[in-house]
Amino acid sequence: MANFTSPALHPVHADRRRIGPVALWAAQLALAGMFLLAGGSKLAGAPAMIALFDDVGVGQWLRYVTGLIEVGSAGALMVPAIAPFAAIALVATMSGAVLTHLFIVGGSPIVPVVLLVGSVAVAWVRRDQISSALSRLR
């Protein structure tokens, strides 16, 4: 006699184990897209970005540096081995952006805060990779 059981009666542990990595990759993809757009507009010389960095007052070189960090890190977020380091670079960049909005140019720091939180989350979830890489340096 065949013993048939419904798959619906069995716990779906495999699907639950996939939720975390899928969510992490979705977050990294979303962050990469946002940073690619933001960094690309800085590198392309969008008038709003030129005006923003004029208001900062240290010169347009910072716009290029920030754009390169954002575009480079956007690509690096898609490479598992270096994604946590891209996230760390973006944490530093977005921390500067939040402080700049709060103390220099004004305006709402909501977008940089959201990008900062996303970058912190990616770095936190991938912290084991960071500690592993650091331990290999010792």
Image (cartoon, grey):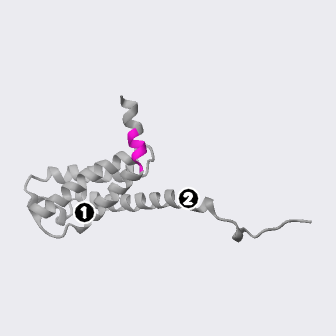
Percent position (x, y) of residue 6?
Answer: 75, 70
Q: At numbered mark 2, what does the secondary structure look like: helix, strand or loop?
A: helix
Which residue: 85% across, 65% down?
A: 3
Q: At numbered mark 1, what does the secondary structure look like: helix, strand or loop?
A: helix
The three-letter code of the residue at mark 1 reads: Pro
* Region in magenta: 126-131
Which mark is drawn over residue 112?
Answer: 1
Q: Residue furthest top?
A: 138
User: Magenta stretch mostly in which secondary structure?
Assistant: helix
Which residue: 36% across, 28% down?
A: 138
Q: CA distance from mark 2 to mark 1?
A: 29 Å
Relative to 63, is 10 above or below? below
| Circle 1 crowding by C-alpha within 10 Å: few under 14, some 14–19, many from 20 | many
Counting every numbered tag in the picture gives 2
Q: Give the quadrant of residue 57.
A: bottom left
Frontmost of labels 2 and 1 is: 2
Percent position (x, y) of residue 73?
Answer: 33, 50
Q: Give the quadrant of residue 28.
A: bottom left
Q: Is residue 12 left or right of residue 48?
A: right
Residue tagged by mark 2?
Answer: 18
Quarter of the picture containing the N terminus is bottom right
Magenta residue check for 128:
yes
Percent position (x, y) of residue 108?
Answer: 18, 70
The three-letter code of the residue at mark 2 reads: Arg
| Circle 2 crowding by C-alpha within 10 Å: few under 14, some 14–19, many from 20 | few
N-term-proximal mark, 2 vs 1: 2
Q: Residue furthest left?
A: 57
Q: Nearer the viewer, residue 25 or 48?
A: 25
Which residue: 65% across, 65% down?
A: 11
Q: Is residue 105 left or right of residue 87?
A: left
